[in-house]
Image (cartoon, rainbow, N blue to C red):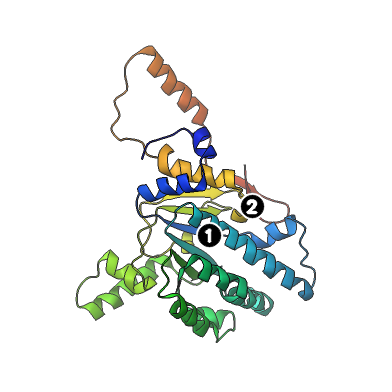
Amino acid sequence: MQPVDLATFQSLSETAIAKQVCEAGHSCWALAMGGTRRAYLAQGGILAAPSDLDGYYHWAEAAQREVFERLYRYGVESIVLIGRIPADRGAIYAAFLRETLQRLVGNAARRECYQRLQLRVRVAGAFDQIAAAVDAPDLPALFTELVETTAHASGPILTYLFRGSWHDPATEEAQYGYQLGMQLGHAPTRAELIQAYYAEPIPPLSVYVGSGRPRIGMLRPPFLCGNEDLYWSHGPLMRLDDHAWRRVIYDHLWARRTTGGRNYAADDHTLLTIRNALSAQDGRIIGIGRNHELGFWVAE
């Protein structure tokens, strides 16, 4: 795999970029796609009455699907879509979440995508607790049916990871590891934990892309994190265009591949270059922002 400059990379075909992604090794991306309702309103959608929800669900499904279909075309082998399930927002929001889960995961357009791309669909998370939180006792059966009907597909992996706001990630992982270890009779390996939790030998994360406030918290995919490259979009991920996604891929493949233990020459040019680089970075802290007048966080 030969390095290229960013301008050249932006001009490459999808096939050429996919070849570079594949040559880099197993690629597993996690996407935390928040801000969907704001993105819908910003592009002219209306959410003023219950009758408006059909339009929202149709748009949200298509917008989300466009993101992960693009990444599959770019050679990503496994994608984890992370969804947050709050349990403290009342019955109306629970009903909204219930419809969202049912429509975004199992509607006709999404199922056509599974078939067309030959996706192996996986669903991870505490199904029973999530079903109770959104008052949808049929959700576990829906998830199980999706997994079973796509189990023998030949394409990439798509994992839905639903994370309840009540989870403490560290406690959850420790408890799960302890229980699995008791079943196995030995301390489980990372591969055994991943296989048991996701029902698939998913590789550790290569990339995590979030939006809004730069934090992972309970959105962290259990057992997959540790060596991934982290990226945050100021706005919702479905608003990123192809140019932006190529910048992320380029940074992951090339810009971050620096070598450790560098020796710097003692000449004046090298020292000036170091001073200028550090001066440009002074005071610039990723993650500082403000509370917008409408109540959400925005970066500086």
The reply to whether residue 165 is in sight is: no
Residue on which the image places disc 2: 239
Badge 1 density bin: few <14, some 14–19, many ≥20, Cα 10 Å: many
Q: Do the residues labelled 1 and 2 touch (CB within 8 Å)?
A: no
Residue on which the image places disc 1: 32
Considering the image in quadrants, where does the N terminus appear?
Answer: top left
Judged from the image, the secondary structure of the residue bearing numbered disc 1 is: strand
What amino acid is found at the position of numbered circle 2 in the picture?
A: Arg
Q: Where is residue 287 in the image (x, y as percent from the top left)?
A: 54, 46
| Residue nearer the viewer, 178 or 18 | 18
Q: Where is residue 254 in the image (x, y as percent from the top left)?
A: 41, 39
Q: Residue at x 46, y 63 (%)?
A: 80
| Residue nearer the viewer, 88 or 239 | 239
Q: Which residue is drawn at 49% across and 69% down?
A: 160
Count the numbered circles shown.
2
Q: Position of residue 283 (x, y in %)?
A: 53, 33
The reply to whether residue 19 is in sight is: yes
Q: Which residue is drawn at 57% across and 53% down?
A: 211
Mark 1 or mark 2, earlier in chain = 1
Label 1 to label 2, Cα distance in Å?
A: 13 Å
| Residue nearer the viewer, 16 or 150 | 16
What amino acid is found at the position of numbered circle 1 in the picture?
A: Ala
**Which residue reaches farthest top?**
268
> On the rendered structure, is 275 left or right of 61?
left
**Which residue reaches farthest bottom?**
137
Eyeballing the image, is 205 above or below 256? below
> On the rendered structure, is 227 left or right of 248?
left
Q: Position of residue 79 (x, y in %)?
A: 46, 61
Considering the image in quadrants, where does the C terminus appear?
Answer: top right
